[in-house]
Image (cartoon, rainbow, N blue to C red):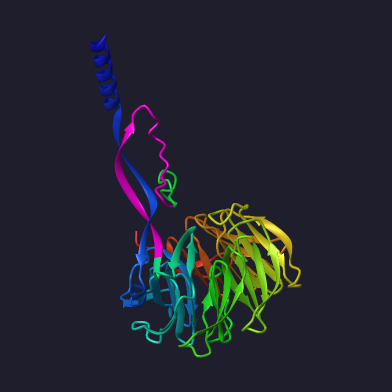
C-alpha cells in the first residue's frame, strides 16, 4: 500500500511540473520616481531644437509658438512664416504642464513651483523668478504626482512598457491577462494604436489651458483651486489669493472681464472686473466629463467627452451666458470624442481626437452647420489666431491652416512628431 501511495505522489508531482508553462507578457504600467528640491531648482536648461515626441498644449506669442511636452519641457518655434515654421530651441522644465507669456516673460509650472523665464532671446532663455511650493499635486490623464512637505520630495509616475516571462498553469486560459502592476495600466492588445488674449503684450492659449493672464494678473487653475498671482513686476510674481473651486478643475478661458472655468462636473463663471479677487457668479452643471470651454458674445461652447475624468456622452453643448448668473443650455450636438475647441467670428472649430478636426458655421446656435471634417489626423487643441490663421496640435504634431474659408481649410505647414 505504501508503494502505491509513493507512486501516486510522484505521479502527481510530475503532472504538476509538466503543467507549468512559460509565457512572455507585455503590458504598460506606472512606475514611480522621485525628485528632490535641488534637482528641481537646477532642472531648467536650454537645449537645441528637438523633435516633437508627445506634444500637448500650444501657446502663441508674437511671432513664436510654444508647444509643451508634458512634464518634459517646451518647444520654441519661430512662426514668422506659418508656411515654414522653424524650431528654435527646447526649454527643459521638469514637471511643466502649462504656460503663459507677457512682455517676454514666460510663466510656467515646474511641479511645485511657479517659474518666471525671460524669453527675449529664445536661444538663451534664463530664469528670473521663482515662487516655491505653489502647487502640491498635479493630475494628468488620471495620473497624479505628490509633494511631501516633510521630506520635500516629489513623487511622480511615468508609463513604461514592461515585458516579462512568467510561469503559468497551462490548464488555465492564458490569453487574458490583467495588465495592472501597482499603478494605472492599459492592455496593449486593445490600445496599440490609437483666445484667451487679454492684452497686446500677452499671448494666446488654447482651450485646454490652465494658465491665463488678464491685465497685471496671472491665473492658474489647479485641480481644486484658482490661484491668483500679481505680475505687475514681471520678474517677481507674487501670490495674492486662492479661490476654492471644488475637485475636478480642468481648464480656464478668459473672455472680456470674465473667467470661464471648465471642470469635470460643470462650467464655473467668474466676474473678473476686480482682477485681484474674482467672484463666482454661477455654475452651469453637466454630467461628469472632461470639459474645455470657449466663449464668444453671449454663447459658451463646451465639449464633453468620455475619458478618465468622466463617462458622459461625447457631445458639444451650446450655452446661453447672456445672463451670467443664470446660464442655460441652448442645444447639445453629438460628437465622436471632442477635445479642445476655438471660436472666432462664428467660425467654430472642434478637435475630435483620433477622429480628426471639424469646422462649423456657428451663426445659429440651434443649427450648427458642419463645414468640413478633416479625417486621418489626431486633433487635441486648436487656436484661431485671426480670421485667416488656425493652429492645431495633436499626437501627430503641429498643423497650421489657412482658415479663410471654413469649408476648405488649407494646410500651410506641419511639424510631425518623431516616430
Q: Which sits in the foreground, 406 or 378?
A: 378
Whether residue 186 is situated above or below residue 282 in the rendered picture? above
As for residue 164 lying within the magenta part, the answer is yes
In percent of width and height, residue 71 lies at 41, 67
Most distant residue in the bottom direction:
233
In percent of width and height, residue 139 lies at 49, 63
Q: Classify residue 228 as left or right of residue 326.
A: left
Which quarter of the rendered picture does the N terminus lie within? top left
Residue at 58% of width from left, 56% of height from top? Answer: 305
Q: Classify residue 102 as left or right of residue 32.
A: right
Whether residue 20 is situated above or below residue 208 in the rendered picture? above
In percent of width and height, residue 337 lies at 56, 55
Q: How many marks?
A: 0
Residue at 69% of width from left, 67% of height from top? Answer: 283
Q: Classify residue 325 as left or right of residue 9.
A: right
What residue span does the magenta drawing correspond to? 155-183
Q: Classify residue 21 as left or right of residue 100.
A: left
**Residue 146 visible in the snapshot:** yes
Most distant residue in the front direction:
2
Which quarter of the rendered picture does the C terminus lie within? bottom left
Q: Quadrant of residue 369?
A: bottom right
**Residue 85 visible in the snapshot:** no
Q: Quadrant of residue 373?
A: bottom right
As for residue 53 lying within the magenta part, the answer is no
In percent of width and height, residue 416 lies at 39, 64
Amino acid at each position: 500500500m505504501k508503494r502505491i501511495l509513493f507512486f501516486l505522489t510522484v505521479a502527481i508531482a510530475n503532472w504538476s511540473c509538466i503543467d507549468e508553462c512559460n509565457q512572455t507578457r507585455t503590458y504598460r504600467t506606472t512606475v514611480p520616481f522621485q525628485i528632490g528640491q535641488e534637482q528641481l531648482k537646477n532642472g531648467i536648461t536650454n537645449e537645441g531644437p528637438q523633435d516633437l515626441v508627445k506634444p500637448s498644449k500650444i501657446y502663441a506669442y508674437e511671432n513664436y509658438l510654444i508647444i509643451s511636452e508634458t512634464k518634459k519641457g517646451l518647444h520654441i518655434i519661430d512662426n514668422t512664416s506659418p508656411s515654414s515654421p522653424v524650431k528654435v530651441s527646447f526649454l527643459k522644465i521638469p514637471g511643466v504642464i502649462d504656460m503663459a507669456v507677457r512682455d517676454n516673460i514666460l510663466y510656467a509650472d515646474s511641479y511645485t513651483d511657479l517659474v518666471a523665464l525671460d524669453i527675449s532671446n529664445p536661444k538663451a532663455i534664463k530664469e528670473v523668478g521663482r515662487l516655491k511650493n505653489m502647487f502640491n499635486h498635479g493630475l494628468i490623464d488620471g495620473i497624479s504626482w505628490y509633494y511631501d512637505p516633510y521630506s520635500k520630495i516629489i513623487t511622480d509616475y511615468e508609463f513604461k512598457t514592461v515585458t516579462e516571462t512568467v510561469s503559468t498553469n497551462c490548464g488555465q486560459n492564458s490569453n487574458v491577462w490583467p495588465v495592472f502592476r501597482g499603478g494605472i495600466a492599459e492592455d496593449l492588445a486593445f490600445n496599440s494604436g490609437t483666445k484667451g488674449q487679454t492684452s497686446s503684450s500677452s499671448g494666446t492659449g488654447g482651450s485646454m489651458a490652465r494658465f491665463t493672464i488678464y491685465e497685471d494678473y496671472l491665473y492658474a487653475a489647479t485641480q481644486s483651486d484658482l490661484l491668483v498671482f500679481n505680475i505687475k513686476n514681471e520678474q517677481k510674481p507674487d501670490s495674492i489669493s486662492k479661490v476654492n473651486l471644488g475637485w475636478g478643475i480642468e481648464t480656464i478661458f478668459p473672455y472680456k472681464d470674465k473667467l470661464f472655468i471648465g471642470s469635470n462636473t460643470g462650467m464655473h463663471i467668474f466676474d473678473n472686473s476686480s482682477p485681484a479677487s474674482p467672484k463666482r457668479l454661477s455654475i452651469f452643471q453637466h454630467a461628469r466629463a472632461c470639459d474645455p470651454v470657449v466663449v464668444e458674445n453671449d454663447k459658451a461652447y463646451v465639449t464633453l467627452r468620455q475619458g478618465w475624468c468622466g463617462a458622459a456622452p461625447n457631445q458639444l453643448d451650446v450655452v446661453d451666458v447672456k445672463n451670467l448668473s443664470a446660464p442655460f443650455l441652448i442645444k447639445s450636438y453629438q460628437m465622436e470624442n471632442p477635445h479642445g475647441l476655438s471660436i472666432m467670428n462664428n467660425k467654430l472649430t472642434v478637435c475630435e481626437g483620433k477622429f480628426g478636426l471639424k469646422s462649423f458655421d456657428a451663426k445659429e446656435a440651434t443649427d450648427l452647420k458642419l463645414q468640413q471634417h478633416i479625417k486621418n489626423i489626431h486633433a487635441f487643441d486648436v487656436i484661431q489666431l485671426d480670421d485667416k490663421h488656425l493652429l492645431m496640435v495633436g499626437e501627430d504634431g503641429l498643423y497650421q491652416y489657412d482658415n479663410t474659408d471654413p469649408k476648405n481649410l488649407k494646410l500651410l505647414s506641419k511639424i510631425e512628431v518623431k516616430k
